Amino acid sequence: MRTIGLFFGSFNPIHTGHLIIANYLANHTDLDEVWLVVSPHNPLKKKDALINMYDRLEMVNLALEQAENIRSSTIEFSMPHPSYTIDTLIHLREKHPEKDFVLIMGSDNLASLKKWKNYEIILRDYRIYVYPRPNYSAAPELEGHPSVTLTNTPLMEFSSTFIRNAVKNGKNIRYFVPDNVLEFIESKGLYK
């Protein structure tokens, strides 16, 4: 049975940090592959801050052109919005019973997991691989949970918010995003 890590995100935009995290988990853990699940609308985020989901997907696909063991997933595009992780996990398990799905999340999300729909079922039925986030330690009450694995993924000190703000303020974002993603952002005038 192949083990697939599911890295959910708005990817608004995808950046080098996302790619380093996905690459580390796909190639330095027991995961066979990592799927970047582009979320049309995260219920814990404001929808008006998001650009079109197809533009975000296109940037993910551009970023993954040379990637090994990492691919994009549009599973949530055809599901009701906002997307709830538990619904997506159940849907994927039904669609791919031959795969073992592991949830990938940052320590910031682990800290807020108890706000998620049916979080108890996620903890009961799925493994969770946690990568470090700046200024967030893992939730102490979940750190020792048998489903939770804290990984040694490199710490990324920047975010999509940083990149959106940099573009809005006319700052150079080269090397924060892959070159082809930068070209896409500039050609479409995104985040200005």
Image (spheres, rainbow, N blue to C red):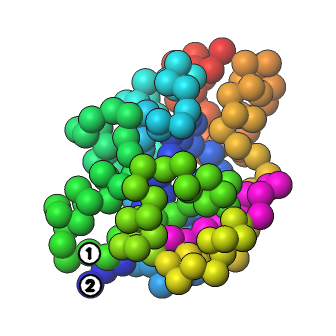
Residue 183 lies in the magenta stretch: no
Above or below 187: residue 119: below
Residue 1, disc: 2
Q: Is residue 163 left or right of residue 72?
A: right
Q: Where's the C terminus, which quadrant?
A: top right
Observer-nearest residue: 31 or 131?
Answer: 131
Q: Is residue 50 left or right of residue 58?
A: right
Above or below 192: residue 123: below
Q: Where's the N terminus, which quadrant?
A: bottom left
Residue 184, disc: none
User: Helix, strand, or loop for circle 2?
Assistant: loop
Above or below 163: residue 92: below
Q: How many marks?
A: 2
Look at the image and give the residue range highlighted in magenta.
128-137
- Position in image of residue 73 (x %, y %): 34, 51
**Do tag 1 and tag 2 residues touch (Cβ < 8 Å)?**
yes
What's the residue at 45%, 59% (across, down)? 119
Can the viewer see residue 67 in this picture? Answer: no
User: Helix, strand, or loop for circle 1?
Assistant: strand
What's the residue at 43%, 33% (across, down)? 41
- Position in image of residue 123 (x %, y %): 45, 70
What's the residue at 62%, 20% (across, down)? 191
Residue at the disc numbered 1: 99
Three-letter amino acid code of the residue under disc 1:
Lys
Residue 131 lies in the magenta stretch: yes
